Image: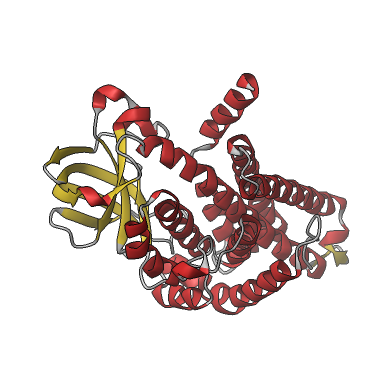
Amino acid sequence: MTIAEPLAFTEEQEMLRDTVRDFAREELLPQAVEIDREARFPRDTFEKIAELGLLGMPIPEEYEGVGLDSIAAMIVVEELAKACGSTALGVAAHNSLCLWPIYAFGTDEQRAKYVPDLASGRKLGAFGLTESGAGSDAGATRTNAVQDGDHWVLNGTKCFITNANYADTFIATAVTDREAGPKGGITSFILERGMDGFGIHKGDEKLGMRGSDWGELTFEDVRVPASQVLGEVGHGFVNFMKTLDGGRVGIGALALGLAEGAYEMSLKYAQERVAFGRPIAKKQAVAFMLADMATQIEAARGLIRTAALRKDAGLPYSKEAAMAKLFASEAAMKVTYDAIQVHGGYGFTTEYHVERMYRDAKLCTIGEGASEIQRIVISREILEH
């Protein structure tokens, strides 16, 4: 049993949802516990995801994408996350943090060179923004780039980079004019695996999302051609803020999927588990927990849908994206927590999916801007406007 979607999806969106749902149940769910336990990136699964066109969601067909709108992309990430949060995270990061910025801010030459390979899944993408001292405060970037003729020379380190060890194409931010401050002094660059001085290193062990790869990027006098500047010099901060708005809708959808997956498993378990002579779903304490889960999921979906619709309409959506990401991620923490409670002792074991979903959900309150940052964005928007 699933929660009914608010408002009708189009026939095409329903077909997409059913296709991705079947794929997730048949391909992702059976191996989700294994890849979590082994902290293994499922490369073969990503090849199948590419065949479905899900690594080119926001890109038009002329660039080998499938041209999905934001609602459809939300559906995809949600359905993948219901089965495996790790896989959904890798797909979302590739689409929203690497592929979309190149298409949105790149030159015609950059689009022609990079977008088809990324959209088709022949290559995987990653986004190098976070540093040890520049996470929530992205303007505190220390990686720097100095112009040398028709090249820029990059030096610095990035951390917690999703898809790092399997990506071929990277976007990285660097300070190009420290006196100009974050809004005018940071520039984005497109880099390729194998460039001299560009190191990629495996990340630390993680609490959750263990099947999603992450790593550290190091730049030691990496010479990047000036033609690889993404967008205008000094516009990196503005452009990655726009990128993060879209990414927050994706993380909201991922959190929603985790919550819904945990809820559906809890609902089924509560209807089958008998205690004191009848299913525990008949006990008010459990029934009320299920009611709260369902309500939080519906509310999260509504917020995510609003942000996605505003994005597709070309309307400002920073506030709505922050609200969607904030509410959905914190709802996912509560829903997955309660899912373990419903399952009792079994919920605490690794044989059941809900403990994995609980651990995965925590990242949603941190990545793409922690909950505290979302509250800053929301409060600024409502106070200024």
The x, y position of residue 91, in whole percent, is 48, 62
Q: In which quarter of the image is residue 138?
A: top left
Q: Quadrant of residue 117?
A: bottom left
Q: Is residue 228 visible?
A: yes
Q: Please report the residue visible at 13 percent of the width from the left and 57 percent of the height from the top.
A: 196
Q: Can residue 39 be seen in this view?
A: no
Image quarter of the C terminus? top right
**Which of the two residues, 240 or 324, is positioned nearer the viewer here?**
240
Residue at the extreme top of the image, as rendered: 383
Q: Please report the residue visible at 34 percent of the width from the left and 29 percent of the height from the top.
A: 184
Residue 96's place in the image compared with 242, above or below, is below
**Which of the two residues, 83 or 106, is positioned nearer the viewer here?**
106
Image quarter of the N terminus? bottom right
Residue 75 is left or right of residue 147, and the answer is: right
The x, y position of residue 82, in whole percent, is 62, 64
Residue 255's place in the image compared with 143, above or below, is below
The mark total stands at: 0
The x, y position of residue 35, in whole percent, is 45, 70
Q: Please report the residue visible at 58 percent of the width from the left and 61 percent of the height from the top.
A: 77
Q: Please report the residue visible at 39 percent of the width from the left and 54 percent of the height from the top.
A: 102
**Which of the two residues, 110 or 30, is positioned nearer the viewer here?**
110
Residue at the extreme front of the image, as rendered: 108
